[in-house]
Image: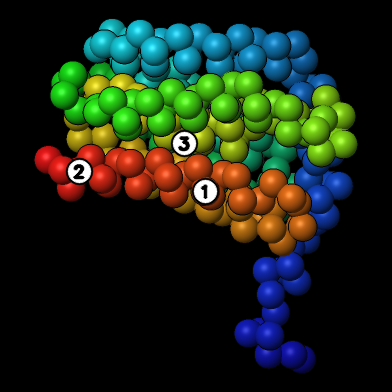
Amino acid sequence: MSEWWTYSLRDLLLFSQRTYTRLFELHNQEWWPLPLFALALGAVLFALAWRGGERAGRTLLIVLAACWLWVAWAWHAQRYAPINWAAEYFAWAWGVQAVLLGVAAWQGRFDAASATIVRRGFGLILLGAVGVIYPLLAPLLGRGWTPAELFGMAPDPTALATLGVLLAIQLRHARWLFPIPAAWCLITGATLWAMDAPEFWIAPLASLLAVGFALAYRLQR
């Protein structure tokens, strides 16, 4: 038997890119027309973040909490778990993030000074990219429209949208809401890299930039 350290991530992956892409296609088909609602919800999310303020911020956090809970069950536990044993643990982590977002919506404190123009601007850009560019990745990469990954339906755009919202709103002490979505972006980047998916770098890079903006603001205070 070969030594375990001789194996790479590609050797440990139990499914192909084609199988993974097919999951999103089946997911969107099963819950149709929910993907259309998800597209509209992404636009609403951007509008609320653009508007800003405490009421919009709490609404955004509630919406995000619901989306994280939905993705935890519908995607990780129901769709992803049959081909990836780690998906059950992912589902629990996403459930924890949903609870954290719900607590922040209920008890979080908002301060207009907690989001600088640059930080807020990047958050809005990230939100806009998730709503407009991310759904186009599948057709641009020759996979068609049916496996498109949408905010509120798929984990990657949901995690990235969450980071965008956290940068854009005026929530104080929001740093404890960053680790799980940022960690997921790194995990999905590694998974996509192992499958030789050309878009593997998008989520990790965006998450590192988001965390960088959050830390830069923290150091300035």
Residue labelled with disc 3? 95
Residue labelled with disc 1? 205
At x 76%, y 57%, the residue is 195
At x 86%, y 47%, the residue is 18
In this orientation, which residue lies closer to the viewer: 63 or 125? 125
In this orientation, which residue lies closer to the viewer: 163 or 177? 163
Answer yes or no: is residue 187 visible. yes
Q: From the viewer's perspective, is residue 39 above or below residue 115?
A: above
Mark 1 in CB contact with mark 3 (< 8 angstroms): no
Coloring scheme used: rainbow
State the separation of the CA atoms marked 3 and 2: 27 Å
Of tags 1 and 3, which is closer to the observer?
A: 1
Mark 1 in CB contact with mark 2 (< 8 angstroms): no
Give the amino acid at mark 3: Gly
Q: From the viewer's perspective, is residue 135 above or below residue 2?
A: above
Mark 3 in CB contact with mark 2 (< 8 angstroms): no
Answer yes or no: is residue 152 visible. no
Q: What element carries label 3?
A: helix
In this orientation, which residue lies closer to the viewer: 13 or 217? 217
Q: Which disc, if any, is residue 214?
A: none
Of tags 3 and 2, which is closer to the observer?
A: 2
* Residue 14 image point, x, y percent: 78, 61
Q: Which disc, if any, is residue 218?
A: 2
Q: Is mark 1 on a helix, strand or loop?
A: helix
Q: From the viewer's perspective, is residue 183 above or below residue 134?
A: below
